[in-house]
Amino acid sequence: MMTVPRNMTYALTTLAISLVAACSSKQAPKKPAPETVILQPSATQNASADVFAWQPRAGENVNQSLNSYRQLESVLNAVKMDNDMAASQFLAQQHNSAMAENVRNEWLKSLGKRQQFATFKQQYQQVEPEGRHQEVRCYAHLFGMENDAQFVNKLVRNTARLPLGCNTLLQNRAGSLNQNDAWRRVRGLISNNQITDARNLAAALGGSIDGGAEGLLANAIRTGSTANLGSLNAQQSSFAWGVLGLKLAKEQNFGNAFNYYSQASDRSQFTDEQFEWYARSALRLQRWADLANIIETMPADLQKDPTWLYWLGRSYQHTGKGNQAKNLYQQAAQTGRNFYALLATEELGGKVNAQNNVSPASPNQVNEISRDGAIQRALNLFHTSQQSGDWKMRRQAQTEWRYATRGMNETTRLAAAQLAFNQQFYEMAIHSADSTDHLLNFNLRYITPFQNLVQAYSQQNGVDAAWVYGLIRQESRFVLGAQSSVGAQGLMQVMPSTASMIARKLGMSQSELYTMDGNIRMGTWYMADARNNLQNNEVLATAGYNAGPGRARKWQASNSLEGAIYAETIPFNETRDYVKKVMTNATYYSALMNLPRTSLKQRMGVVPARY
């Protein structure tokens, strides 16, 4: 496990830990003093929309946090072996925490599987509703403790793998399920190669996937053959056309994908993913009337996604329905500060707004938040992980922070964000600031640490500093020494093999990858190199930085293409999301740093034709 170099081990770490421990030794008040926690609203803030609703929890010192963390893995392993005593003893020693909630959820799954109703009921009531895992809720439905039809309907509409308890629930309720949706799930499971679950649900529905029409469908899905689709009913064949269309669309064969999709007579059989790639196929072909028709027939929840609000608006605009387009842009613009909200705002004649509408938290407000026991646990683990380079502990610290701030209102969350920033827990400062809808502190949403290095190396390599910050925010959330599951390192998540190449070209040591200075130098050089080798285009370079330049080229069209269309039709979910977020981040950073290029549409520009 890589550690942060000693010359960068955070001079304030020891002091920060001692301060947290000192805070934990104080008696937490039974009730917080609201006047010391609620931020004073600015003139533009609607204070009545954010009622104070937070109460600090009992505190603990560093050793208590570490002891709980060190027990956690062994307790979870014991719970998986149906060891009720281990779970009970661990929970008896715990304050409210993410660790306790995790153990209790895993214990509840074990109890549900073994049908231990009495203990399940007792423990279930001790988990906050927003903290209950999906499978735990499924067992609660099986035991008659919940009766949420919307929850069950959502499950049966899901065509992906579900945990044991949820599969059991659907099989138990097979007779009362919407039969169209239930068989659609069976077919979706077949398409995802979840054959056992598909067979079990089909049997519960009184059918089989091993013969007859469903057997022919299963074969068509597995082989990609269209030969026998004419002998299937509308529902069966439509699902098959959706599967085949999806495969071609992800291969960037948009013309044939669109034709396959169009063979389906019952679009209700499409999964959400199939529907979205049908729409993306029409978008890539710029068949605007067809795109409008596809989006209009999507499930209602999918239509409300800002992606499809925006593209339906664009479709209407291209087909002469200006008033309807404006209405959809307004709806998309109200969904937050995401890629399509900002594009929709620009279509309405607006521009990025990075003005805070709330005053910064005061030192007293931040200190009040620091007295919360769950916050203390998160900071205890965070600072210890900094010293040790233990990234598993760092992830647990993040989990504890999310748990600690989950019940806070927006004013309190912004005070927590300021505390996290002060403690250099940068990723959770962004997390907390990013989670507010009404009270907006853009300086905490889009933090700018390491400015001297970012500015110097951006200028040296001829890249936009706002773009660099936008990429770092998405890559690492400013976590020094961050490392990904595939080995990417540091603030800018440079792969060691890439770092070796860069080091040779720049006359650096490859070991500089693991320093803040060297990582930013390498990352900004690689951004410039990717852009220069990808037709001087930032959108292509951003895709190439994440997925490799070869793939970025492969996803280009034979003709020039609007940047937003290129981004939306990237076949990798991670890269598609990455490009949209990096470019949106860059637009906000430009506004905050008083740099040019504060229009997202202009920043996305046009992706040139592949050559």
Image (cartoon, rainbow, N blue to C red):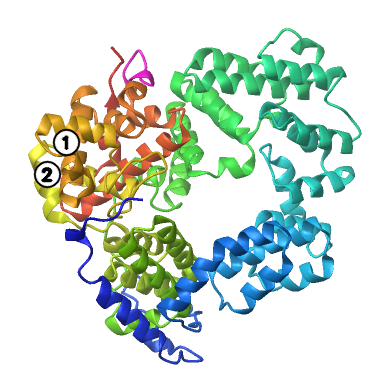
Residue shown at 10%/33% (left/top)?
506
Is the Cβ of the residue at disc 2 closer than 8 Å to that at disc 1? Answer: yes
Query: Gap in Å between the C-alphas at discs 2 and 1?
Result: 8 Å
Whether residue 525 appears in magenta in the rendering, the answer is no
- The answer to whether residue 425 is visible is no
- Looking at the image, residue 238 sits to the left or right of residue 38; the answer is right
Viewer-nearest residue: 347 or 108 = 108
Viewer-nearest residue: 577 or 16 = 16
* Classed neighbour count for the residue bearing mark 2: other residues with Cα under 10 Å, few (<14), some (14–19), many (≥20): many
* Classed neighbour count for the residue bearing mark 1: other residues with Cα under 10 Å, few (<14), some (14–19), many (≥20): many
Q: Establish if 307 lies above or below 426.
A: above
Measuring from the top left, give residue 391's x and y in whole percent: 39, 56
Magenta-tinted stretch = 553-560
Q: What element carries label 1?
A: helix
- Looking at the image, residue 161 sits to the left or right of residue 203; the answer is left
Residue shown at 84%/62% (left/top)?
144
Question: Which quadrant of the view contains residue 343?
Answer: top left
Residue shown at 80%/50% (left/top)?
169
Measuring from the top left, give residue 309's x and y in whole percent: 49, 40
Q: Mark 2 points at which residue?
A: 457
Whether residue 557 appears in magenta in the rendering, the answer is yes
